[in-house]
Image: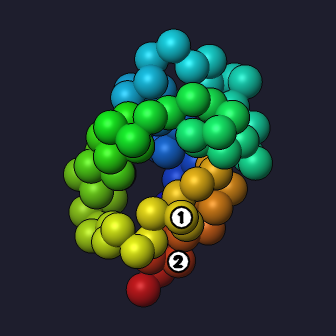
Amino acid sequence: MTPADIRTAFVDDLVMVAPDLDPGAIGDHDHLQEDLGLDSMDFLNLVAALHKRFGLPIPEADYPRLATPSKAVAYLTEMLAA
């Protein structure tokens, strides 16, 4: 998967847990909680969706690496390559 594919999948899962978000308006550096308004349950649902989609364990210690779309894409790219 390319980083662009991973970003598309990430945004798809993000919009699935927060359907009021406009996928086209989500910036690479938008903070999921501070800028996009996800609460802690939304964030956990996103982590679960990413785990299901990519088949990767995402430990709680790595949650800060998912704080923005660009950080999440970098993290997921790294994890998928390992």
Secondary structure, mark 1, is helix
Residue that extends furthest to the bottom in the rendered view of this protein:
82
What residue do we see at 25% from left, 63% from top? 55
Q: Could you say where residue 74 lies in the image, as x and y percent from the top left? A: 61, 67
Count of marks overlaid on the render:
2
Residue 21 lies in what quarter of the image?
Answer: top right
Q: Could you say where residue 68 lies in the image, as x and y percent from the top left? A: 64, 51
In this rendering, does residue 80 appear at all? Answer: no
Answer above or below: position of 52 versus 18.
Answer: below
Q: Nearer the viewer, mark 2 or mark 1?
A: 1
- The circle drawn on residue 82 is none
Answer above or below: position of 77 versus 53.
Answer: below
Q: Could you say where residue 15 lies in the image, as x and y percent from the top left? A: 47, 27
Q: Identify the residue position indicated by label 2 in the image.
A: 78
Query: Is 56 on the left-hand or right-hand side of 40?
Result: left
Query: Is 54 on the left-hand or right-hand side of 29?
Result: left
Q: What whole-number distance in Å separates the C-alpha atoms at marks 2 and 1?
A: 15 Å
Q: Identify the residue position indicated by label 1 in the image.
A: 64
| Sequence-wise first label, 2 or 1 | 1
Q: Crowding near pointer 1: few (<14 within 10 Å), some, many (20+)? A: few
Amino acid tagged 1: Pro
What residue do we see at 61% from left, 24% from top? 23
Amino acid tagged 2: Glu
